[in-house]
Amino acid sequence: MPEPPWSSLRNRPARPVRRPLTRDAIIDAALRVVDTEGLVALSMRRLATELRVVPASLYGHVSGREELLQLLLDRVAGEIGRPPADPDDWQAACREFLRSLRSALVGHNDLASAAIGNIPTGPHWMELVDGLLGLLVAGRMRPAAAAYASDLLIEHVITDVYEGALFAQRIEADPGYFDSLSQYLHALPADRFPNIAAMVDHLTAGGSGSGDARFEFGLDVIFHSLANATVATDDESTRAAVVRPVRGIHVPSTA
């Protein structure tokens, strides 16, 4: 029913309909902030601004920034399918899983840094870790070695993605950074730095695929080394017996 001519509400603009605040809406908004502004910009106040709510209203859904980071990492983990339980080629399945994790994290700026010094423990992330451990055991790796290997492999993904995000931010601020670095390395005296001079073109090789190549090289090094890796336990040194030639949840010792 329309307002009568004398009503003070007649010419008042209609208020926009607010959607109810949910945890999923908070995670969606937090990812938008990270994707566009980086993890450093994400705060409860900034998130409230993004959602057009008061900061206090967020705390009915998340306890604070630390819980929010866990939720963001778990959301990304949920984008990846759990690795197969008993693959015909465990190593190929490991590699494909790690590539999928890398691709998912790359799509969210520097979010990967939230997993450095902070062990993700959300249900989706735990499913990924559990699946990776299953693949390593399928490769006939002993439990102690599988625990270390899962941590090392996931750490390789996280550090690769985070460094890539930092370089992207560096290039945005200083587009000529790598050109200047290349010129400097080429100008170094060969008599003092003979090895750098001999390999300078390899050291300065760039291009859109160079990051992928370095990541795959890292996987090659790790997998080729696992067959001869040993893990010191309380009672003995356990050899990782991989017959057929990831941040995990391993907790570092504080001793």
Image (spheres, rainbow, N blue to C red):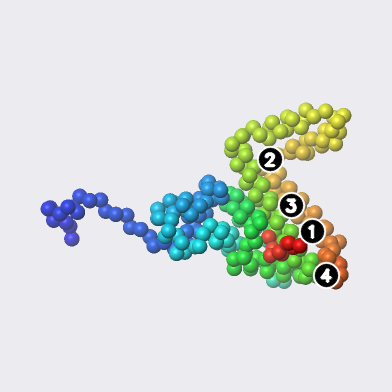
What is the C-alpha distance between the residues marked 3 and 1? Answer: 11 Å
Q: Which mark is residue 215?
A: none
Q: Earlier in the sequence, mark 4 or mark 3?
A: 3
Can the viewer see residue 205 in this picture? yes
In the picture, measured across the screen, residue 74 lies left or right of residue 153, that is left
- Amino acid type assigned to the residue bearing label 1 in the image: Phe
Viewer-closest of 207 and 41: 41
Which residue is located at x 74 percent, y 30 percent? 184
Crowding near the residue tagged with mark 4, few <14, some 14–19, many ≥20 C-alpha atoms within 10 Å? few
Q: Earlier in the sequence, mark 2 or mark 4?
A: 2
Q: Find numbered disc 2 in the image and state the secondary structure of the residue it sits on.
A: loop
User: Looking at the figure, which quarter contains the N terminus?
Assistant: bottom left
Q: Secondary structure at mark 3?
A: helix
Q: Residue type at mark 3?
A: Glu
Mark 2–mark 3 contact, CB under 8 Å?
Answer: no
Residue beneath disc 2: 207
Amino acid of disc 2: Gly
Mark 4, residue position: 234
Residue placed under numbered mark 3 in the picture: 216
Q: Earlier in the sequence, mark 1 or mark 4?
A: 1
**Residue in the picture at 73% in, 29% down:** 183
Compared with residue 10, is residue 141 higher up or lower down, i.e. above or below? Answer: below
Q: Secondary structure at mark 1?
A: helix
Amino acid at the residue labelled 4 = Asp
Viewer-side residue, 66 vs 74: 66
Residue 192 in percent (x, y) is at 86, 31
N-terminal label among 3 and 1? 3
Residue 223, numbered label:
1
Mark 2 and mark 1 in contact? Answer it, CB < 8 Å.
no
Q: Is residue 184 above or below residue 72?
A: above
In this view, the mark in front (1 or 4): 4
Question: Residue drawn at (59%, 66%), measured in percent from left and top?
Answer: 122
